Image: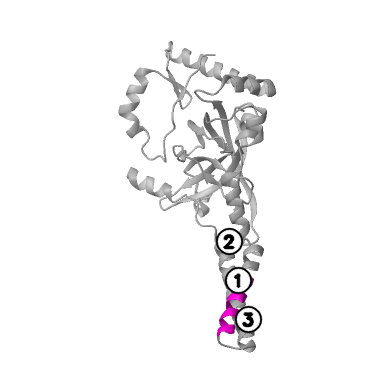
Amino acid sequence: MPDFQKDQAIETTDDNLDIKVVIAWVATLGLGIIGALLGGCVGYLAGAGVATLIGAGVGFLFMFLIGFLALGPAKKIIDDAYTNYAPPDATRTAVLGLTKEFSLHVTVHNLRNTVNTEGILAFFGKQNDSFVQIRCGRQMDEDSDFLPGKNPPKRTCVSHNNTFEETFNFLVAPTENTLLVDLYDQDMIGDDLVGTAKIDISQDVLAGGFPQKMGFKLQREEGLLFGKTLKKTGTVILSFYPGDGFPQKVKDRIKTKAPLEWKRLEDTQKQIYTESLAKYTKTSYGSLIRDGTLMTKTTMLYNEHSEAAHFAGTAGTGSATQLEQP
C-alpha cells in the first residue's frame, strides 16, 4: 500500500461524534416540540389567535429547558467549559512549582497480554498489525471530552511482535493533564481500536518520578448503547524522561519526593549510555538515542538515505531523544 494511502487510513482512527450526545439533543428537541403542541392547545382554548402562538412558544421553551437540564446537553456544555478554562493541576503548580510548558519524552517499549482482533483469522495464526498512538491534551474526568493540545498525535511503526522501542517528545502546556495511549490493529480498510490507556501527567509521571518501564492498562468499551462496560484488552509498557529545558529545581523536588523511581531513571540512563559506548566505542556531544540505540553522525547520515526503505509498511516513525551523560 502506498504511504499516502496508509496516512489516510490512519486518519480514520480519530474520534467520531458521540452518539449519546446526539440522542440527548434530539430528545431535548422532541420535548420542546411536545411542549409547543401542549402549549398551543392551552392557548387555543384560552382565546385562540395570538394566545395560541404565545402558548406554543412558552410550552416549547419550558419543555426544552427541562430536557436541556435533565437529559445531558447542559452537563456537556458545562464540562467542556470547565475543561477549557479550569486552572492547571495543583500538584504540578503548588507542590512541584512547575508553571510553564515543559518537554516530556515518552518511550513505547512493548505490549503484553493484548487481545487478538483478527476474528476468525486468528485461528489460522493471524496476528494483530499493532501500532500505538499517543495524544497529549486535557480531560477533567471520565465523562468529559478529551481536548487535544498543540502536539499532533504521535504514532509508532507497525509491529507484528508487539515490540516498538520508540521515543516521542511532547511539549506539555500547563493546562494539559492527560496522555491518551491508543492501541490499534491496522487493517487494509480502517483500523480497529484495541484499547486505550489514560495517563495522568501530574500524578503518574511527575509525582511518580518519571517511572521506567511501567505498565498501563489498556481498556475498551463493549456492550450496548446504554449498557457499556470497560474490558481490559492488554498492557502497554512505557518509560518517561524529562526533556530539554526541564527546570533543575523541579527535578530536585521530584527526586526528593520519589527517590526510588528517580534512582531507577538514573540507572536506566547509565545502562543505555554504557551499552551505547560499548557498541559504538565512542560518542560526542549531541549524540542521539533512537529506538534504544546511540545514533552517531555516521549512522544518522545513513538512516537519512535508507529510512524510506527501512520503514516501508509501517504506521509512523519514532522521534529521537538526546542522550544525557550520567
Magenta span includes 52: yes
Callout 2 secondary element: helix
Q: Amino acid at mark 2?
A: Lys
x, y percentage for residue 192?
Answer: 50, 50
Q: Around disc 1, counting alpha carbons within 10 Å, would you say few (fewer than 14), some (14 to 19), or many (20 or more)?
A: some
Q: Report, in whole angstroms, how far the alpha carbon at label 2 lies from the one at label 3.
A: 27 Å
Residue that carries the numbered disc 2 in the rendered image: 20
> Taking the image as drawn, is residue 193 in sight?
yes
Residue that carries the numbered disc 3 in the rendered image: 38
Q: Amino acid at mark 3?
A: Leu
Q: Residue at x 38, y 35 (%)?
A: 311
Q: Residue at x 43, y 14 (%)?
A: 285
In the figure, 115 relative to 91: above or below? below
Q: Residue at x 60, y 87 (%)?
A: 44
Q: Earlier in the sequence, mark 2 or mark 3?
A: 2
Q: Which residues are magenta?
A: 50-63
x, y percentage for residue 219?
Answer: 61, 46
Callout 3 secondary element: helix
- The outermost residue toward the top is 282
How would you classify the magenta stretch by its main secondary structure? helix
Residue that carries the numbered disc 1 in the rendered image: 61
Q: Amino acid at mark 1?
A: Leu
Callout 1 secondary element: helix
Q: Nearer the viewer, residue 261 or 9?
A: 261
